[in-house]
Image (spheres, helix red, strand yellow):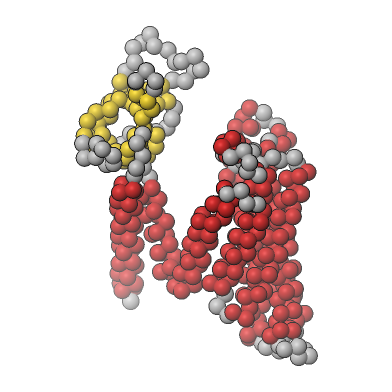
Amino acid sequence: MKTNRKSRALILLFLLLSAGFISAKLAEKWVISTWDYEDSWLVTLQGYEKIEKPAEEEPDELGWETVQYKLVVSFLTGEKKGETFPVTVEHLANSQLKFVKGGKYILAVDHFDDGSSFFSVSDRFRFPLVCAFIITLALAICTLSGVDGTRAILGLVLSLVLLVKWAIPMMLGGYSPLVISICSVSVISALTVALVLKKRQYWPIAFLGAVGGAAAASLLGWMSIYLWQLTGIEVEGGTLLASILPDLSMKGILLASVIIGAIGAVLDVSISITSTMAEMYDYDPEISALRLLQAGLSVGQDILGSMINTLILAYFGSSLVISLLISYHVPIVWSVLNDPLISAELVRGLAGTAGLLLTVPLTALIGAWWIGRILKGGQPE
């Protein structure tokens, strides 16, 4: 028996790794076939050597030290596809970009008015490996969790498609980020609840609880943004986005990120409470609404501690780099919390926490009322 289990585990591992490898190759071929940039190419590094600078050369006036390399690359895209020849590139000495023979990179070129050209390696080409990891993990979840895991992955995929294909284009088109985010989280909530909860008679409980929690998060987010005088350009890329699209409401974008960022944790709590109350009612159809309410609140309180930890630490981790920079230059606690970048992350964390706090009693109350009055048909307890 143990041998059979071990064999099945090895076969499963082999299949998952094979799926990851195949997905990486397919992703690479897709990018190569659709690559149409004139100032950059995908290349395979065949060899490289560092070009030593003369001893008298010093770093430029800004103090940036650059390093030159002579690379031998094979072009995978563009007019030079299939050709191999040397290219001299230059980049910052502390850029942390490591050259690996056989690795794939993005080679870029800048053309200047005097007719000269400047080649540089902008980044590693990691997209195929990213796809491989994502697909392998998704298949592992589907395999180990069965239908439930597959439903969860499907819900995540549909949610991402909605955000990328509809929400983002609508915001870029000038529509209100607040309205778009509310519509998005409503649809995401409906999709997730329908895919995760198997019994449709309990769908309204989880949906209304999640939407109520998202509403609480948006309210606290709006209050924090207004009272803390955040403009929305503090977030990473905010200044660049505001300069490219000056008519875009950056405060609205920040609030939209708060609402969308909170919906995942809020949905988790609302669905967990709903599932617990549903199981109790299915086990004992005569259970009172008060007992269901107490159970929902008790379960919600247990979940709340870990979910708040997860939410706050996730946002703290995303702002760790800027926290280190601020603490290094101004090692004072209040200066870290006063920084606009950290404040923007705090808004997300605190708003998400407020959403969770309201989701617990709201879902429990809706569940007790829905089961006690709707499912039981208003019969006396």
Q: Is residue 98 visible?
A: no
Q: Please state which of residues 268 and 123 is positioned toward the viewer in this rendering.
A: 123
Residue 201 locus on image (x, y percent): 62, 81
Tell me which residue sits at (38%, 59%) in the image. Answer: 136
Task: Judge whether 216 appears above or below 144 on screen.
Answer: above
Residue 142 locus on image (x, y percent): 43, 68
Quarter of the image for the N terminus: give it: bottom left
Task: Judge whether 192 appears above or below 235 on screen.
Answer: below
Residue 196 locus on image (x, y percent): 55, 72
Quarter of the image for the C terminus: give it: bottom right
Task: Judge whether 5 appears above or below 161 on screen.
Answer: below
Residue 365 locus on image (x, y percent): 75, 73
Tell me which residue sits at (39%, 34%) in the image. Answer: 122
In this picture, residue 193 sits left or right of residue 20: right
The answer to which image quadrant residue 6 occupies is: bottom left
The answer to which image quadrant residue 290 occupies is: bottom right
Q: Is residue 83 visible?
A: yes
The answer to which image quadrant residue 249 occupies is: top right
Task: Judge whether 318 appears above or below 272 on screen.
Answer: above
Q: Please state which of residues 228 and 328 is positioned toward the viewer in this rendering.
A: 228
